Image (cartoon, grey):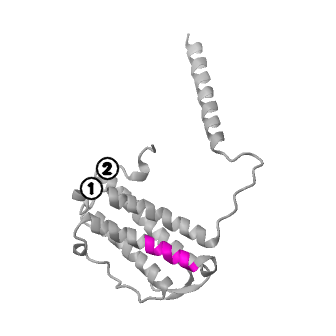
Amino acid sequence: MKTNSIRLLALRIVAAGILVTAAHAQDMPKQGAAPKPAPSASEAVLAQWNDIGRKLIAMAEDFPDDKYDFKPTPAVGTFAQRLIHAAHANEFFINALQGQKMPEMADPKRDQFKTKSDVVVFVKKSFADGAAAIKAKGDKGMSDLVVDPFENEQARISDFAYGFVEHSGEIYGQLTVYYRVAGLVPPESRPKK
């Protein structure tokens, strides 16, 4: 009897493995199909910029109004302050690409944004303006040089952009912790419909 149970379990595991492999095979490109071409330099930068922007905007829109001033520990900024920081940092990127004066180094104060909606608008605008600046530079512009105000050194626009994408990704990671400590599930971690 025990041997039959073990065989039945082994058969179930093999069957499950076959089903999972078949499901993954459907997601794989067809064998022999020509690979998609690599994105251009500006398309690659723009895709990364827009992806992290989408994630932070989703959080900004999703997090409850009554928790916008939540912080997991007294030593860190609030949820709203972290979003404001990310959007403000994007202004350095945008201004550098547009040849404009750099913004003030200090983040805007929370009281400049009276409502959740005000913060959401600021975050959305920063990513939309950044995307527009990347598009305006195009492929040739990705190799142009700007001065990184934080390092006071020249940087290629593509490298400069990836630094801001990484910074926004760090903020995203921090905010996932805010979600979890507040007993919530971040939008990207929810089951897909």
Q: In this orientation, does residue 151 appear?
A: no
Could you tell me what secondary structure mostly forms the magenta stretch? helix
Image location (x, y in percent) of residue 97: 50, 83
Q: Name the one closer to the observer, 108 or 72.
A: 108
Label 2, label 1: how far apart the Cα atoms are = 10 Å
Numbered circles on residues, count? 2
Quarter holding the N terminus is top right
Q: Which residues are magenta?
A: 128-137
Residue at 25% x, 60% y: name it. Answer: 70
Which class describes the residues within 10 Å of circle 1: few (<14), some (14-19), or many (20+)?
Answer: few
| Residue type highlighted by circle 1 | Pro
- The C terminus: image quadrant: top left
* Lateral position of residue 38 relative to residue 118, left or right: right
Name the kind of residue labelled 2 in the image.
Answer: Leu
Contact check, label 2 and label 1, Cβ < 8 Å:
yes
Image quarter for residue 15?
Answer: top right
Residue 128 appears in the figure: yes
Residue at image mark 2:
184
Which numbered circle lies on residue 23? none
Give how far across and how far down residue 91 sits, in percent. 41, 79
Q: Secondary structure at mark 1?
A: loop
| Quarter-of-image position of residue 12 | top right
Q: Residue at x 41, y 46 (%)?
A: 190
- Mark positioned earlier in the residue sequence (2 or 1): 1
Question: Closer to the observer: label 2 or label 1?
Answer: 1
Q: Position of residue 118 (x, y in %)?
A: 28, 69
Q: Is residue 3 above or below residue 162?
A: above
Identify the element where label 2 is drawn. Answer: loop
As for residue 136 lying within the magenta part, the answer is yes
Which dot marks residue 64?
1
Q: Nearer the viewer, residue 31 or 131?
A: 131
